[in-house]
Amino acid sequence: MIVTIRLMMANKPIGDGQCSRGLEFRTPSGAKKRKKNKLDALTAVWNEQVSQWNEHKTDEFAISFVYQQQNQKCREQALRFGRHDEKAAEESDLDVSIGSISLDGSENPIHVGPLSQKVSPAAA
């Protein structure tokens, strides 16, 4: 795992037998994004709670709603990853060679499984 993370951070290719899926937030830039996402969600919920306290009301559905609104992009990204992996697994006839997908199009792609075939993230 540490070797794979170091390769990711150095923008070097990840070899066969290594997988970076799930490790993207263990890099400094990934950890920073994850921390920001968590803080944004916490802030949204806190602000809604303070607003409700000031109005002397309790609305757990409103709190849930602001949290869901705040993490929408994270959920969409997870869904894209899942769909990409599903399609790649179907195309590879259950081979573990899944290919790669980019977090946001600007960073190195995440490499999953032994790279015997590549699947375009745009096709996912």
Image (spheres, rainbow, N blue to C red):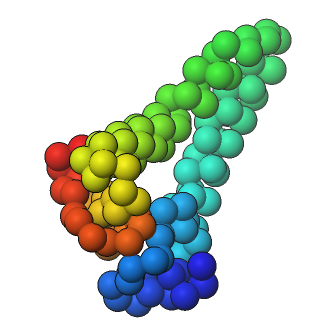
Which quadrant: the N terminus?
A: bottom right
Name which residue lies at 22% across and 64% down.
118
Question: Residue 102 occupies which quadrant of the picture?
Answer: bottom left
Q: In the picture shown, does residue 41 fall above or below 21?
A: above
Which quadrant: the C terminus?
A: top left
Q: In the picture shown, does residue 1 fall above or below 53?
A: below
Is residue 101 shown to the viewer in this render? yes
Name which residue lies at 73% across and 11% down.
59
Tell me if 98 is positioned left or right of 46 in this view.
left
Whole-percent x, y for residue 119 in the image = 22, 57
Of residues 26 and 34, the one nearer the viewer is: 26
Is residue 84 shown to the viewer in this render? no
The total of numbered circles placed on residues is: 0
Whole-percent x, y for residue 19 in the image = 47, 70
Q: In the picture shown, does residue 80 fall above or below 105?
A: above
Name which residue lies at 64% across and 51% down.
39
Of residues 35 and 59, the one nearer the viewer is: 35
Whole-percent x, y for residue 113 in the image = 42, 67
Tell me if 121 is positioned left or right of 61 in this view.
left
Of residues 104 and 39, the one nearer the viewer is: 104
